[in-house]
Image (cartoon, grey):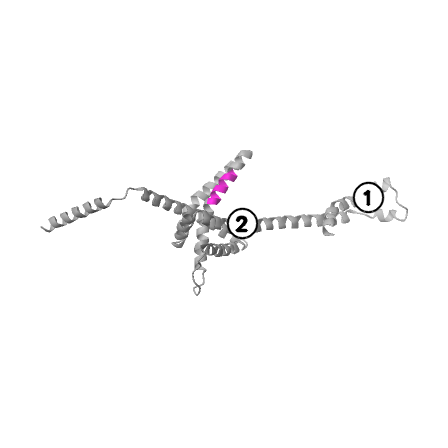
């Protein structure tokens, strides 16, 4: 019933417009007893129907925005768990970085965040190809940032664990617990939308950059040639000889 009324309302409102009523009255004369009623139709009825249509459209737009935002909130924990499953070492390093403080990763991720926004705005003004490139840059940035946000969620989840219970054997529960806490904070009007959400993404970007840098340093150190046992023995003999000479 409600759906049928929504679909039929535009046609009803057009049919009740005074000009339409007048035209229909000229083409198809009503009985004399009905003519006074038809002639009394004015703009108030039509304006009332138009206001109702505008209200329905406003509610539809509001519900659409709400469900899109709700979909994003449901997708974020899945993305954080995916990052933890695909790049566990990077997420672990990002969590370690966040444990030492949030200012360092925030200022580390701020330049890349500003550069991404400027590049996306500049490319978005170059037509369809530029918009596609801007969307690709934004997706690449969000993938890097959400690896760090997964580390931030892991750190928060570790601090939210109950001290009376044993540590979770499944690590993903820690990330999920912290992610749910952050998402509930994102829902807070004004503060969550315009402060907590962008700041957490910026912190995640900086934590990811620091974690990637640490991974590169660790891999470079692992590739360096390690001294053999003979070289260690030779160095030890040289050190003992020098020490004995110094004592003499």
Can the viewer see residue 130 in this picture? Answer: yes
The percent position of residue 123, horizontal first and vertical second, equals 51, 36
* In this rendering, position of residue 27 left or right of residue 49: right
Instruction: State the SS at label 2.
Output: helix
Numbered range of the magenta stretch = 134-143
Mark sitting on residue 31: none
Q: Which residue is mark 1?
A: 21
The percent position of residue 38, horizontal first and vertical second, equals 84, 47
**For the stretch drawn in magenta, what is the main secondary structure?**
helix
Tell me the residue at 55%/51% (across/down).
Answer: 74
Q: Which residue is mark 2?
A: 75
* In this rendering, position of residue 239 left or right of residue 107: left
Residue 142 part of the magenta segment: yes
Residue 73 part of the magenta segment: no
Tell me the residue at 53%/34% (across/down).
Answer: 129
Instruction: State the SS at label 1.
Output: helix
Q: Are marks 1 and 2 in contact (CB under 8 Å)?
A: no
Mark 2 is surrounded, within 10 Å at the Cα level, by few (under 14), some (14 to 19) or many (20 or more) other residues, namely few
Total number of numbered discs in the rendering: 2
Q: CA distance from mark 1 to mark 2?
A: 52 Å
The percent position of residue 153, horizontal first and vertical second, equals 46, 53
Mark 1 is surrounded, within 10 Å at the Cα level, by few (under 14), some (14 to 19) or many (20 or more) other residues, namely some
């Amino acid at each position: 019933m409600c759906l049928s009324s929504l679909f039929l309302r535009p046609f009803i409102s057009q049919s009740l417009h005074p000009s339409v009523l007048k035209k229909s009255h000229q083409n198809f004369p009503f009985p004399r007893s009905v003519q006074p009623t038809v002639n009394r139709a004015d703009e108030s009825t039509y304006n009332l129907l138009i206001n109702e249509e505008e209200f329905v459209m406003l509610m539809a737009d509001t519900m659409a925005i709400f469900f899109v935002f709700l979909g994003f909130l449901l997708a974020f924990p899945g993305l954080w768990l995916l990052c933890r499953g695909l790049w566990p070492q990077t997420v672990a390093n990002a969590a370690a970085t966040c444990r030492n403080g949030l200012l360092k990763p925030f200022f580390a991720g701020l330049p890349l965040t500003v550069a991404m926004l400027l590049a996306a705005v500049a490319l978005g003004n170059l037509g369809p190809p530029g918009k596609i490139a801007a969307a690709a840059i934004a997706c690449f940035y969000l993938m890097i940032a959400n690896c760090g946000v997964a580390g931030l969620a892991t750190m928060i989840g570790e601090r939210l664990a109950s001290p009376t219970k044993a540590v979770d054997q499944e690590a993903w529960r820690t990330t999920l617990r912290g992610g749910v806490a952050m998402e509930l904070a994102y829902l807070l009007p004004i503060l969550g939308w315009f402060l907590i959400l962008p700041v957490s993404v910026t912190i995640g970007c900086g934590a990811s950059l620091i974690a990637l840098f640490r991974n590169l340093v660790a891999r470079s150190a692992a590739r360096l040639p390690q001294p053999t046992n003979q070289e260690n023995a030779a160095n030890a003999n040289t050190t003992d000889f020098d020490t004995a000479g110094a004592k003499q």
